[in-house]
Image (spheres, rainbow, N blue to C red):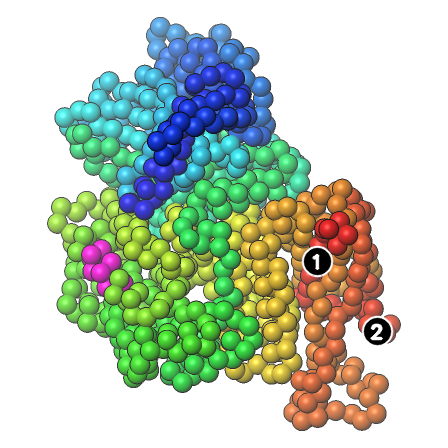
């Protein structure tokens, strides 16, 4: 994990320097002396002391973690167990937190007291930070382990707590950046094991990350059957759990689960984080909305099998856990070894779901994504997949690239089908050599020709898979995950390579190193198109309960090596669309293909759901052909752009087949996107309303300095004579004056259908009339205009009333003509006189 470790070490050094300076003096302003170029230099440094100290130690082993807007308080009880006292809106630090301690003066009937020394203490009634089984807590434990004698009781007791450097997790990526970390050390004497609980505080993002490390100090082997990354016990309340679930081409739909007595659990056993249940989830007050109320957000820096669960106990406490899914997980921890859990990410906001999302977005952008492309504008690309699928020649590819350049695109991406004998999806995965019949000049020659057009060049790979019909499989059939006792089930006519084997990882790493050097490749789309089955390894010394996790660690090892070797390449993660849309992959790849479904209406749902946990700067969105392959729903080229523009824009259709009208529209779209790209990609994202409960969705992105904003207005179904509405912005500077306008969209005559014949002196044939086609390709109507100069307060609190929608009473250039699955974009810029 050298690249990740290097970045973390740099941040750790910076943090050490800050701590050293802080402890030099208690004054907020002080001088230090250093030697530079053999000369003594005095530096006056001013520090905001409140922003440096994030972790406070109080009396009786209490610990207070603070971010800008949140507090997390815990303590070591006299029994040695760690009690969670409070997590929520920021409160003042004090030395005495007795007012938050659990009060159990008389104990509880029919409970199991922890000890005969204190029969009033029942762990089943305590808000615990990390629980095990066997000592009276009958809720789901955070960890289940077995001694060598098969005893499954464990009891970890507090030893110490100290500030430390953020840990490097063995075989796993994690967050980085300025933070303070608390390590709480516990020990189980009988097991002869140490448990370290890590809490890292990211002040600006209002994030606390957690992980656990189990260390075997004894002589025997400890079997780990379950080990969560974190546990948070919340007090009684009216809580609702939001999960983001789906399947292929319908990823991350928002679902609400009212938390009542029992367990609500989602997760994945597919081998990946999966499109079925994303690792991100929310627990919110039942009354919380997008802009008001208490919300907790949780995520996991992990790409494999995971679980997220909330349990309401018989006494009303709500236990929240996430981590590696215990399904078929059994880790053999030998003497002297340690096991690290993936990093869990927690946040809280009392400003509703948008406030919670803002915290998560900031964290992903600043503390997960890394490397050259972290803050760099992403290029507008054209991908050939839905234009050609496997059937292409070099001539066809160059014609698409030439048209893409004329329209304003900046990159061309060659997708599946360029290697081996890959004319369909039944063969050649693993054979990463160029198909010279399709590309006689190879990738090198093709990329050079595309570069000469003024375009960057990108390439698709799917290196974790192997086709049974491939040279690689014929040479190494034991390199695939499969059982000796069953015929292997194939997904998309392929098998999964066994990344737990060092020789497989070496082959992938070396082969891709050669591929990435074929030409001037500046972008890689890394795909993974099937879920696991027949999970059995032929690796010597295998332990089947470790395969899922070792596979993911093997993948991370490959990614770490390749991203270090090729730091300038823009990597995009893909897994049948959004099948591996998670923080683990974002540690290596700054963006992910959001879904294989490019239908504009479906994408509003998919991108809305995704936005709760992830910023638009990691979401790739493409304008594809109409009607959509996913559902045959037609939509205008302008609507498809409006949806795709709220993230990382691309086009995935045969641009050589666009008519004159569509080419004119696309050219204007790309000009607009480039002009507002910084805001659209990296601004602060807001949801206005809930598209899962309404026919209208509004997204808004505001630039960091609040001088610019773009609002998207999306309609599902238009109701007849629906009247007018009021559109309000959010997140602006209420003291700033803005110039507002609509993005001018081209309106095709075909929108009017047969009605166009009413005012015409001659009747046109709508089916195959040449004159009709000529008119619709030539005449470019423009949508209505809205232009105002208003204060931010007016735009947010009063809003504006857009033009009258079309209601069959006539049409002119002031009419707001919206059809089913349609949209508008409204743009704000700081008023020019103020800008001076």
Tell me the magenta residue range: 504-512
In the drawing, does residue 476 fall left or right of residue 239?
left
In the drawing, does residue 324 fall left or right of residue 815?
left
Alpha carbon separation for disc pair 2 and 1 = 22 Å
Of 499 and 361, which appears nearest the observer?
361
623 to 371, vertically: above or below = below
Q: Quadrant of the N terminus?
A: top left
Density class for disc 1 (Cα within 10 Å; few <14, some 14-19, many ≥20) is many
Q: Looking at this view, name the residue that lies furthest to the right.
A: 809
Q: Residue beneath label 1, please?
A: 827
Q: Is 466 included in the stretch rendered in magenta?
A: no
Residue at the spot 78% in from the left edge and 92% down from the top edge: 763
Residue at the spot 55% in from the left edge and 51% down from the top edge: 682
| Image disc number at residue 812 | 2
Q: In the image, residue 300 lies at what x, y percent?
A: 42, 42
Density class for disc 2 (Cα within 10 Å; few <14, some 14-19, many ≥20) is few
Of 777 and 352, which appears nearest the observer?
777
Residue 332 visible in this rendered orientation of the protein: yes
In the drawing, does residue 9 fall left or right of residue 362?
left
| Front position among marks 2 and 1 | 1
552 to 223, vertically: above or below = below
Q: In the image, residue 251 lies at what x, y percent?
A: 49, 56
């Amino acid at each position: 994990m050298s690249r990740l470790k290097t970045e973390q070490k740099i941040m750790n050094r910076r943090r050490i320097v800050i701590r050293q300076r802080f402890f030099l003096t208690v004054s907020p302003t002080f001088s230090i002396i250093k030697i530079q170029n053999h000369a003594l230099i005095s530096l006056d440094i001013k520090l905001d002391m409140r922003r440096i100290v994030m972790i406070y130690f109080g009396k009786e082993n209490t610990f207070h973690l603070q971010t800008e807007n949140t507090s997390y308080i815990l303590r070591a009880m006299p029994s040695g167990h760690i009690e969670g006292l409070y997590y929520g809106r920021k409160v003042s630090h004090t030395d005495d937190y007795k007012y938050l301690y659990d009060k159990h003066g008389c104990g509880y009937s029919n409970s199991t007291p922890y000890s005969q020394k204190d029969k009033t203490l029942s762990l089943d009634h305590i808000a615990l930070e990390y629980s095990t089984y066997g000592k009276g807590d009958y809720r789901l434990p955070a960890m289940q382990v077995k001694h060598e004698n098969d005893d499954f009781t464990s009891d970890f007791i507090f030893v110490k707590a100290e500030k430390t450097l953020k840990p490097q997790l063995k075989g796993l990526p994690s967050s980085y950046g300025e933070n303070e970390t608390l390590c709480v050390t516990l020990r189980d004497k009988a097991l002869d094991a140490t448990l370290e609980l890590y809490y890292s505080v990211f002040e600006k993002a209002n994030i606390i990350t957690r992980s656990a490390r189990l260390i075997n100090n004894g002589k025997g082997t400890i079997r780990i059957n379950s080990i969560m990354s974190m546990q948070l016990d919340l007090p009684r309340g009216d809580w609702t759990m939001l999960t983001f679930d789906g399947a292929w081409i319908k990823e991350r739909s928002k679902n609400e689960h009212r938390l009542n007595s029992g367990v609500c659990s989602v997760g994945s056993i597919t081998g990946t984080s999966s499109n079925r249940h994303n690792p991100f989830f929310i627990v919110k007050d039942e009354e919380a909305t997008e802009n008001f109320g208490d919300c907790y957000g949780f995520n996991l820096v992990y790409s494999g099998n995971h679980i997220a669960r909330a349990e309401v106990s018989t006494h009303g406490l709500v236990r929240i856990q996430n981590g590696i899914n215990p399904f078929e997980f059994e880790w053999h921890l030998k003497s002297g070894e340690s096991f690290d859990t993936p990093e869990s990410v927690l946040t809280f906001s009392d400003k509703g779901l948008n406030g919670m999302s803002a915290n998560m977005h900031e964290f992903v952008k600043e503390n997960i994504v890394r490397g050259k492309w972290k803050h760099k504008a992403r290029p507008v690309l054209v991908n050939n997949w839905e234009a050609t699928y496997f059937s292409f020649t070099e001539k066809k590819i160059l014609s698409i690239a030439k048209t893409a350049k004329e329209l304003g695109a900046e990159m061309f991406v060659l997708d599946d089908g360029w290697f081996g004998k890959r004319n369909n999806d039944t063969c050649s995965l693993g054979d990463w050599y160029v198909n010279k019949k399709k590309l006689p000049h190879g990738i090198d020659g093709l990329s050079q020709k595309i570069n000469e057009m003024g375009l960057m060049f990108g390439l698709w790979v799917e290196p974790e898979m192997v086709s049974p019909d491939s040279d690689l499989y014929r040479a190494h059939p034991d390199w695939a995950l499969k059982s000796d006792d069953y015929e292997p089930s194939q997904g998309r006519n392929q098998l999964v390579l066994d990344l737990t084997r060092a020789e497989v990882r070496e082959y992938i790493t070396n082969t891709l190193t050669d591929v990435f050097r074929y030409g001037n490749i500046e972008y890689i789309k890394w795909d993974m198109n099937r879920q696991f089955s027949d999970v059995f390894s032929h690796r010597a010394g295998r332990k089947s309960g470790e395969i899922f996790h070792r596979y993911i660690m093997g993948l991370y090892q490959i990614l770490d090596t390749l991203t270090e070797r090729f730091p300038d390449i823009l990597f995009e993660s893909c897994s049948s669309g959004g099948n591996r849309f998670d923080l683990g992959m974002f540690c290596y790849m700054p963006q992910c293909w959001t879904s294989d479904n490019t239908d504009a209406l479906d994408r509003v749902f998919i991108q809305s759901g995704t936005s709760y946990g992830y910023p638009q700067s990691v979401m790739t969105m493409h304008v594809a052909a109409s009607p959509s392959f996913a559902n045959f729903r037609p939509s205008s080229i302008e609507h498809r752009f409006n949806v795709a523009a709220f993230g990382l824009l691309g086009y995935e259709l045969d641009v050589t087949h666009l008519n004159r009208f569509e080419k004119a529209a696309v050219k204007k779209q790309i000009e607009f996107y480039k002009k507002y790209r910084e805001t659209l990609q990296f601004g602060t994202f807001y949801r206005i309303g809930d598209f899962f409960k309404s026919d209208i969705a509004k997204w808004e992105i505001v630039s960091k300095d609040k001088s610019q904003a773009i609002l998207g207005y999306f309609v599902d179904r238009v109701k007849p004579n629906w009247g007018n509405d009021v559109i309000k912005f959010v997140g602006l500077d209420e003291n700033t004056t803005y110039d507002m306008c609509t993005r001018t969209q081209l309106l095709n005559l075909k929108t009017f259908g047969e009605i166009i014949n009413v005012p015409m002196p001659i009747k046109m044939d709508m089916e195959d009339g040449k004159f009709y086609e000529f008119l619709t390709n030539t005449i470019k109507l423009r949508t209505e205009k809205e232009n105002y100069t208003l204060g931010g307060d007016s735009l947010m609190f009063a809003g504006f009333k857009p033009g009258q929608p079309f209601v069959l009473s006539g049409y002119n250039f002031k009419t707001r003509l919206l059809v089913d699955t349609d949209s508008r974009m409204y743009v704000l810029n700081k008023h020019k006189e103020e800008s001076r």
